[in-house]
Image (cartoon, grey):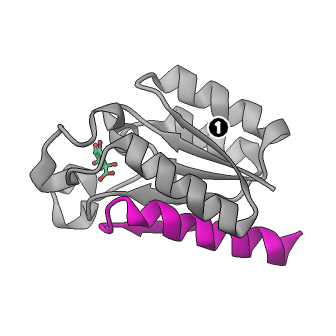
């Protein structure tokens, strides 16, 4: 099975961006850890980042034919994008949402996520390790549901 891991806006800046909140780990570090984890789980990984809402939506639409599940950190778009939520719902694929920080400990406007409404599960506050946990959960989901 193939898992698409999507990263939203500003996550390309991880490592230099607000390290007290997001840590020193870069997105490349997270991708590397995910590749290793996926290898162990015998999953193919498609790891991407975009700052553009439309690009993320296009990738979600394409995933219908090319992936078996989606792990997504939609970053700021989590809190704003009805369009991304609609695309995820239309994909008919299992979705697991990840946030590096615990969005519930932060500003009120981060407490609501449109992505959560269409996600099977949500992992927040565990940094880059959350992506690996999401891969574990996705492997289990795909193994038990197909
Ligand atoms: C984030 C949390 C969002 O509120 C924020 O806009 C981000 C990163 C996280 O991974 O903690 O860009 O998704």
Classify mark 1: residues with Cα within 10 Å, few (<14), some (14-19) or many (20+). Answer: some
Residue 143 percent coordinates (x, y): 81, 73
Please give the residue where the numbered disc 1 appears in the rendered image.
87
Does the magenta portion include 139? yes
Direction from residue 16 to residue 36 in the image, left or right: right
Which element type, helix, strand or loop, lies under badge 1?
helix
Closer to the camera in the image, 77 or 26: 26
Which part of the image, by quadrant, shows the C terminus?
bottom right
Q: Position of residue 103 (x, y in %)?
A: 26, 60
Q: Residue at x 65, y 30 (%)?
A: 59
Q: Is 83 placed above or below 100 here?
A: above
Image position of 139 (left or right of 20): right
In the displayed structure, would residue 59 be above or below residue 41?
A: above
Q: Residue at x 39, y 48 (%)?
A: 29
Vertical arrangement, residue 42 with respect to residue 73, above or below: below
Q: In the rendered structure, which segment of residues is drawn in magenta?
A: 120-146
Q: Looking at the image, which is closer to me, 87 or 70?
A: 70
Residue 67, picture quadrant: top right
Residue 139 drawn at (x, y percent): 71, 69
């Amino acid at each position: 099975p193939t898992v698409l891991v999507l990263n939203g806006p500003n996550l390309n800046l991880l490592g230099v961006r607000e390290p007290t909140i997001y840590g020193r780990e870069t997105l490349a570090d997270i991708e590397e850890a995910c590749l290793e984890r996926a290898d162990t789980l015998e999953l193919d990984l498609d790891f991407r980042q975009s700052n553009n809402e439309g690009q993320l939506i296009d990738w979600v639409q394409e995933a219908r034919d090319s992936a078996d599940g989606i792990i997504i950190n939609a970053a700021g778009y989590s809190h704003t994008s009805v369009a991304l939520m609609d695309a995820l719902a239309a994909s008919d694929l299992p979705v697991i949402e990840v946030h590096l920080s615990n969005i519930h400990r932060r500003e009120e406007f981060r407490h609501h996520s449109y992505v959560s409404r269409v996600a099977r599960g949500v992992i927040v506050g565990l940094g880059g390790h959350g992506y690996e946990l999401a891969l574990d959960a996705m492997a289990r989901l795909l193994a038990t549901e197909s």
